Image: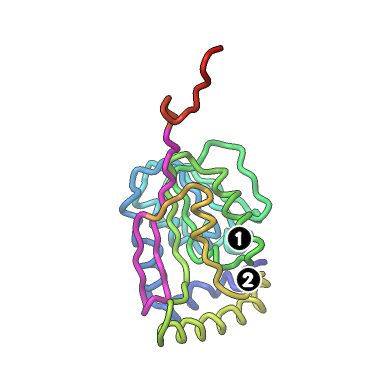
């Protein structure tokens, strides 16, 4: 999977096909997490969300991961233009095999990224990110969805069939359809806090929160009787 061939065209393609809708979806819940200090952006692409995060969290440290070297170059160029001095790391990597060994991240950002993976790959990707997340981390997830019924569902199915056909040829993504990530996020102890849908329910913006496990109390522990 590589978006190298689309990197130099992705920005104008997004503007023509979606206007400002995708960026509105990306940033919907950004104001809810302004105090994050160690931020991971995965599959960041051309860097528009990175720019928005940098302006919202001027003191934060950022790690940007993408499998596409050309997309990382686009993000670097945008970063230089906004003139920030934050601590930032750009890393070319495959999230299917990525392992993090540094400080845990308290905010994860994945926009129009999780939909690139097959049902077999997505649990591994989310588990790898979850292993790098702090016990009370937040996760901003924006993606395409398929509504439950009616004309909106038929419309979404048509749009996504065309989109997956194009991206499978252009970028060699493994996914053939949308895979709902909710169960895999819940397996990593994240719980949904906020949700909003856009464009006749074709787009969805979520805020997930990992809740720290409750400490065990004496009442919850089976105590053996002394002999």
Left or right: where 29 falls relative to 184: left
Checking the image for residue 79, the label placed there is: none
Q: Main secondary structure of the magenta part?
A: strand
Instruction: Name above or below for residue 63 compared with residue 7.
Output: above
Q: Earlier in the sequence, mark 2 or mark 1?
A: 1
Residue positioned 47% across, 81% down in the render: 156
Measured as percent of width and height from the top left, residue 97 is found at: 68, 52
55 lies above or below 197: above
Q: Quadrant of residue 82?
A: bottom left
Q: Left or right? Give the position of 121 relative to 26.
A: right
Q: Residue at x 41, y 83 (%)?
A: 152
Q: Which residues are magenta?
A: 193-214
Mark 1 packing: few (<14 Cα in 10 Å), some, or many (20+)?
Answer: many
Q: Toward the viewer: 89 or 26?
A: 26
Membership of 124 in magenta stretch: no
Q: Does residue 200 sit above or below 51 in this rendering?
A: below
Q: Which residue is disc 2 drawn over?
A: 175
Residue at mark 1: 122
Quadrant into which the C terminus falls: top right
- Of the 4 image quadrants, the one containing the N terminus is bottom right
| Residue 99 percent location from the top left of the image | 64, 45
Q: Give the residue displayed 44% in from the left and 31% down from the top.
A: 220
Relative depth, front residue between 214 and 222? 222
Instruction: Give the image location of residue 199, x and y in percent.
Output: 37, 78
**Residue placed farthest to the front in the image?**
227
Which residue is most to the left? 31
Magenta run includes residue 208: yes
Q: Nearer the viewer, residue 107 or 215?
A: 215
Q: Is residue 190 above or below residue 111?
A: above
Q: CA distance from mark 2 to mark 1?
A: 9 Å
Classed neighbour count for the residue bearing mark 2: other residues with Cα under 10 Å, few (<14), some (14–19), many (≥20): many
């Amino acid at each position: 999977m590589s978006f190298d061939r689309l990197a130099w065209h992705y920005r104008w393609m997004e503007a023509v096909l979606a206007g400002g809708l995708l960026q509105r979806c990306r940033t919907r819940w950004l104001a809810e997490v302004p105090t994050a200090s160690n931020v991971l952006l995965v599959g960041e692409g051309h860097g528009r969300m990175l720019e928005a995060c940098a302006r919202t969290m001027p003191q934060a440290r950022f790690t940007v991961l993408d499998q596409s070297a050309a997309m990382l170059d686009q993000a670097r160029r945008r970063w230089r233009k906004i003139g920030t001095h934050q601590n930032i790391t750009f890393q070319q990597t495959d999230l299917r095999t990525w392992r993090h060994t540094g400080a845990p991240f308290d905010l994860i950002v994945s926009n129009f990224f999780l939909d690139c993976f097959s049902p077999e790959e997505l649990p591994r990707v989310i588990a790898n990110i979850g292993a790098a997340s702090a016990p009370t981390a937040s996760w901003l997830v924006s993606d395409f969805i398929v509504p439950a019924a009616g004309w909106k569902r038929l419309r979404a199915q048509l749009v996504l069939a065309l989109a997956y056909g194009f991206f499978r040829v252009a970028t060699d993504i493994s996914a053939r359809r949308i895979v709902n990530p909710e169960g895999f996020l819940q397996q990593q102890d994240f719980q949904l806090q906020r949700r909003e849908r856009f464009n006749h329910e074709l787009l969805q913006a979520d805020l997930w929160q990992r809740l720290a496990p409750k400490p065990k109390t004496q009442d919850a522990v089976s105590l053996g009787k002394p002999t």
